Image (cartoon, rainbow, N blue to C red):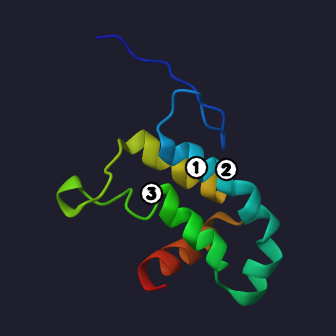
Amino acid sequence: MGVSHMTYAAGQAEPNDSPIPCAAVALAPEIKAAADVIERERQLPKSIVDGLRHAGVVRMAMPRTWDGLEPDPLTQFRVLESRASGYDTANCMRLSWKAVNHG
């Protein structure tokens, strides 16, 4: 059985990627630019939360039976990676989770 050797540049979308990673990568500069505000206010700005929702990131990990998008694990990893690009990973993930589930 052969092994596939796919490589992806961190924080970048490829031309044949699904819309979710493309949209998530497009949000990375906005997240990075808002880093000081995010840190000071300890929450994501509404524009970023709305962007994550519109991109499908909110429904990404939900199964299709629950109206989720359920992309493959590599796509999910790449989306999470793009969201953390240029910002404190743990804090970005925590704030994203809080915004998505409680905001």
What amino acid is at disc 1?
Ala
User: CA–CA distance between discs 2 and 3?
Assistant: 13 Å
Tag 1 residue: 23
- Asked whether, in this view, residue 19 is left or right of residue 35, the answer is left
Q: Position of residue 24 (x, y in %)?
A: 58, 52
Give residue 48's quadrant in the image: bottom right
- Asked if disc 1 and disc 2 are in contact, CB closer than 8 Å, the reply is yes
When the figure is inspected, residue 81 is found, relative to residue 3, above or below; the finding is: below
Instruction: Kindly tell me whether residue 60 is visible in this rendering.
Output: yes
Q: Position of residue 50 (x, y in %)?
A: 56, 70
Identify the mark nearer the N-term, 1 or 3.
Answer: 1
Tag 3 residue: 56
Residue at 58%, 43% in the rendered image: 22
SS at mark 1? helix
Q: Which of these two is toward me, 22 or 85?
A: 22
Binning the other alpha carbons within 10 Å of mark 3 as few (below 14), some (14 to 19) or many (20 upward) gives some
Q: Which of these two is toward me, 94 or 67?
A: 67
When the figure is inspected, residue 101 is found, relative to residue 87, above or below; the finding is: below
Q: State which quarter of the image contains the N terminus.
A: top left
Q: Position of residue 73 (x, y in %)?
A: 38, 44
When the figure is inspected, residue 82 is found, relative to residue 10, above or below; the finding is: below
What amino acid is at disc 3?
Gly
Tag 2 residue: 26
- Asked if disc 1 and disc 3 are in contact, CB closer than 8 Å, the reply is yes
- Asked whether, in this view, residue 70 is left or right of residue 96, the answer is left
